[in-house]
Amino acid sequence: MPGRSHGRRRSVADLDAAVTVPGPSAGPAATDLRNRIAAIWSQAAVAHERARDLRQQMEHVQAETVALTQAIRKACSDRHAMAARPGQTPRPAYAEMAARLQTMPVIEQAKGIVMAQSRCGEAEAFAILRRVSQQTNVPVRDLAAQIVAKVTG
């Protein structure tokens, strides 16, 4: 069938051949048409370059995503392996994060108490806790535990 491509993609040359532009004797209308076609081809070239750049950026992001996923899986498997061996001490970063996770609720409770008593915002309440901690040379987590214990009785 003459009008079908039979599953084959049309090339730029095929499309070029399909466009019939009148010769120079046709006048200003032909020149205008040639200029519009040239502008469209120029826009298509810019769009093609942009699409190529975006494809490269997408491939880069996909590679980073795969690397991060692998790192997360490794960290999770390392954590599970450490939990399976109770005799060994965990890695320092994991131990630090576990300690912070345990002390964070107490600090948040102490901030809430300070906010209620001082009628201040969250940032200001933490600044008060930090300042008192520095003045008394007591860690914030210990100071927070003392405040919560005193209020709860």
Image (cartoon, rainbow, N blue to C red):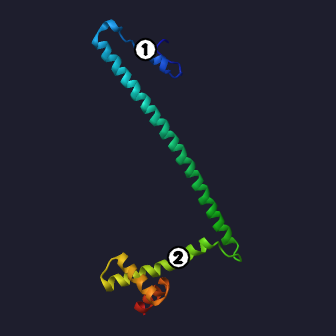
Q: Which mark is residue 89?
A: none
x, y percent for residue 25? 32, 6
Q: Going from the N terminus, do you reach mark 2 or mark 1 first?
A: 1
Give the image quarter of residue 21: top left
- In the rendered image, the quadrant that contains the C terminus is bottom left
Q: Residue furthest top?
A: 25
- Specify whether 121 is left or right of 152: left
Q: Which mark is residue 18?
A: 1
- Looking at the rendered structure, the kind of residue marked 1 is Ala
Disc 2 crowd, CA 10 A, few/some/many (<14, 14-19, 20+): few
Compared to 93, does 152 lie above or below? below
Label count reads: 2
User: What residue did someone put label 2 on?
Assistant: 100
Q: Are marks 2 and 1 in contact (CB under 8 Å)?
A: no
- Specify whether 17 is left or right of 33: right
What's the residue at 50%, 18% (across, down)?
Answer: 5
Depth check: give the residue in front, 20 or 112. Answer: 20
Q: CA distance from mark 2 to mark 1?
A: 70 Å
What's the residue at 54%, 43% (across, down)?
Answer: 59
Q: Secondary structure at mark 1?
A: helix
What's the residue at 58%, 55% (across, down)?
Answer: 69
What's the residue at 60%, 71% (across, down)?
Answer: 94
x, y percent for residue 18? 43, 14
Give the image quarter of residue 33: top left
x, y percent for residue 58? 51, 44
Compared to 11, does 145 lie above or below? below
Q: Secondary structure at mark 2?
A: helix
Disc 1 crowd, CA 10 A, few/some/many (<14, 14-19, 20+): few
Compared to 26, does 133 lie above or below? below
- Looking at the rendered structure, the kind of residue marked 2 is Arg
